Amino acid sequence: MLADKELFDRIEEVLSEQGVIEQFEEENGRIIGRMMIVLGDVPDNLKSDIDMDENDTVFIGTFDFYDSSVGMVLNTTTMQTKGGLWITPEVPNADTPSQEWCEFFIETVSKCIGKNGSFGVPMYTFCSETADFTVVPSLPED
């Protein structure tokens, strides 16, 4: 489940009003899945295994088609991960995200981080069978 479905729905509504969703679907097919990436914490059972430093950030990927989230620690300056991925079920007997979706989560986070280590969150990703796009908040330019 998405970290904040209501917020995601509002972003999707704005994108629909702007014609972005319609254009994407005309070019790439119907949106069949959504992923939301937020900041989080290392699970308690992994804290002793992961030595965090000031450039390390915990990213959590949530999906509208899985009831489990995927997490990782990433140094946004060096782009190195620490401790590998972890899966957190959100309901009993939840399906585990496939390796393909875990890799997609890593790729999405990586491509949304600037050369200086900057990034915006939440990251909102829309997927069709053939393409995807991600919307990331940014600070207004002066």
Image: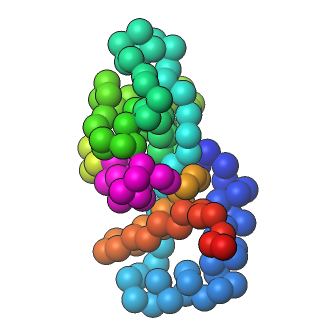
Left or right, residue 123 beside residue 27:
right
Question: Quarter of the image holding residue 78?
Answer: top left
Taking 18 as reference, is 94 above or below it? above
Residue placed at 55% from the left, 55% from the top? 120
Left or right, residue 53 beside residue 103:
right
Q: Residue 17 at what x, y percent from top left?
A: 69, 84
- As for residue 37 lying within the magenta part, the answer is no
Q: Front-most of 127 and 136?
A: 136
Left or right, residue 28 beside residue 142:
left
Q: Is residue 87 visible?
A: no
Total numbered labels placed on residues in the image: 0
Q: Front-most of 141 and 128?
A: 141
Q: Front-most of 65 and 15?
A: 15
Residue placed at 28% from the left, 37% from the top? 80
Q: Is residue 5 visible?
A: yes
Q: Residue 103 at what x, y percent from top left?
A: 28, 48
Residue stretch in magenta: 105-119
Indicate how the structure is coloured in the image. rainbow
Residue placed at 40% from the left, 53% from the top? 116
Q: Residue 114 at what x, y percent from top left?
A: 41, 58
Q: Residue furthest top?
A: 48
Residue placed at 43% from the left, 35% from the top? 55
- As for residue 109 lying within the magenta part, the answer is yes
Q: Residue 105 at what x, y percent from top left?
A: 37, 50
User: Where, quadrant-wise, is the C terminus in this rendering?
Assistant: bottom right
Taking 78 as reference, is 14 above or below it? below
